[in-house]
Amino acid sequence: MLLVYTPEIKPRLKYIFDLILDEVLGITYKLTTDQEHFIDFIGPKFNYSQEQIAKEHFIYANGLLLEKGIHPQKIEKQNYLEQTVIFANTVENSLIPFDLFAASFYLVSRYEEYLEYTPDKHGRFPAKSSIAYQSGFLQKPVVNIWAKHLLELLQNEYPRLESKPIHEYTFSPSYDIDIAFSYLSKGIMRTIGGFLGHLRQLDFDQIFDRTKVLLSGKNDPYDTFKYQQETHNKYRGLRPNYFFLLGEYGAFDKNIATDRWRYQNLIQSINDHYNIGIHPSYKSNSDDQIVQQELQMISAIVKKDITRSRQHYIKLHLPDTYQTLLDLEIEKDYSMGFPEELGFRAGIASSFNFYLLNQEIKVPLKIYPFCIMDVTLRDYKKLSPETAIKKIEEIVASVKSVDGLCSVVWHNHSLSQIDGWEEWRTVYESMFDCAASRKKYQI
């Protein structure tokens, strides 16, 4: 057992110590505020406070974990472990030159997203406003890296300190079904509008393809679900997650109407094989009742409670979005990532229960952060398929190095081999070859 001395035990401190020591590192530990007990203890221990007691291992505590409320933080930085670290200090006797627990809490709680910021055109917190992006470590799972480094330092002093992590490296593919079919089940008006749009652009190939799909049974280009299943079947132990958009048709919600039998059959069929969840519509992000209605619709289609969610357009607003999900008894959310940048929005490649800063409480909502998304690679970063494969390999290698969670987001339409996605099945298959293997390697 590891004993940790701290002058006070506050909710933030207990939360992040549980996450780092217990969940990520798998160390049995105990907190104490009793200095005499700490000094007399024979075994692995360290002091987390603002001053060293004797000559024990000592990590200088910044003070963030003992605070209440949300305030702009003055965050010092320096270079350590060949990268920038935050909540740095120059305390001579500190085991490491930064408060890794305060830094981890700041990232995982998404503290900065409670502060004032300039949103993007969709009202989202921009990746470039994050301290991870500005410090150059967005594409590294730094919380896991820091935790692993702490373990190495402690085991150098206490070789018998056991680490038995609950989780191992895991590849978790997932899919957002924003538009299930390109041509099918669109209804008369949308179908006519589609033909007219092709005609205005003199796109006779699209007119021909749409006609063949509608009249002669040619496979719809967005119906890539059999191909996905064939890919999954090549690898053992995969359990993908599918998130279905059920919002009313609008500027940013363009899926098939929920009363269409073909769409309902698709949802039911996917539910027979994989995990499914709600993909709350763009419009629902500002109206809790719409989220509830969409959740009721998908639950009715599959005749079971739905407890998984990922926000459409990754419209994640803290704490409101998560409070809505909690109220609707959603248990797992997969929205923690940036749409415009690869990497780790919360700095971590592990699942974790969220901490609501406005209530100072750990809540029963499990967060599964993603680090790679297809539209990030092609649409936001404008990468070629060849460069995208290299970036994926780098991210996957960083997750494997810390035995973390590699969660990725794909779309059925990005496997369609049309509309600029012609070469992206190669990227998709390369990602599976790389990420589904447990082999570790350096890029």
Image (spheres, grey):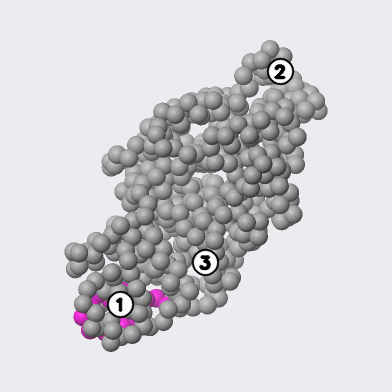
The three-letter amino acid code for the residue at tag 3 is Lys
> Residue placed at 21% from the left, 77% from the top?
42
**Considering the numbered disc 3 on the image, is that residue within a helix, a strand or a loop?**
strand
> Residue placed at 40% from the left, 66% from the top?
18
The three-letter amino acid code for the residue at tag 2 is Leu
Q: Mark 2 points at which residue?
A: 214
Q: Residue furthest bottom?
A: 36
| Residue 29 percent location from the top left of the image | 33, 69
**Considering the numbered disc 2 on the image, is that residue within a helix, a strand or a loop?**
helix
Magenta-drawn segment? 49-63
> Residue placed at 33% from the left, 85% from the top?
34
Residue 380 part of the magenta-drawn span: no
**Considering the numbered disc 1 on the image, is that residue within a helix, a strand or a loop?**
strand
Real-space CA distance between mark 3 and mark 1, rounded to the nearest whole angstrom:
24 Å
> Residue placed at 71% from the left, 47% from the top?
296
> Considering only order in the chain, which callout, 1 or 2, is on the residue closer to the N terminus?
1
Q: Which residue lies furthest to the front in this view?
A: 303
Q: On the picture, is 51 further left or further right than 68?
A: left
| Residue 265 percent location from the top left of the image | 66, 30
The three-letter amino acid code for the residue at tag 1 is Asn
Residue 61 part of the magenta-drawn span: yes
Q: Mark 1 points at which residue?
A: 47
Q: Mark 3 points at which residue?
A: 362
In front of the other: 210 or 333: 333
Please tell me whether mark 3 or mark 2 is closer to you in this view: 3
| Residue 298 percent location from the top left of the image | 68, 42
| Quadrant assignment for the N terminus | bottom left
Mark 3 closeness class: few <14, some 14–19, many ≥20 residues within 10 Å = some
Q: Do the residues labelled 3 and 2 touch (CB within 8 Å)?
A: no
Overall secondary structure of the magenta section: loop
| Quadrant assignment for the C terminus | top left
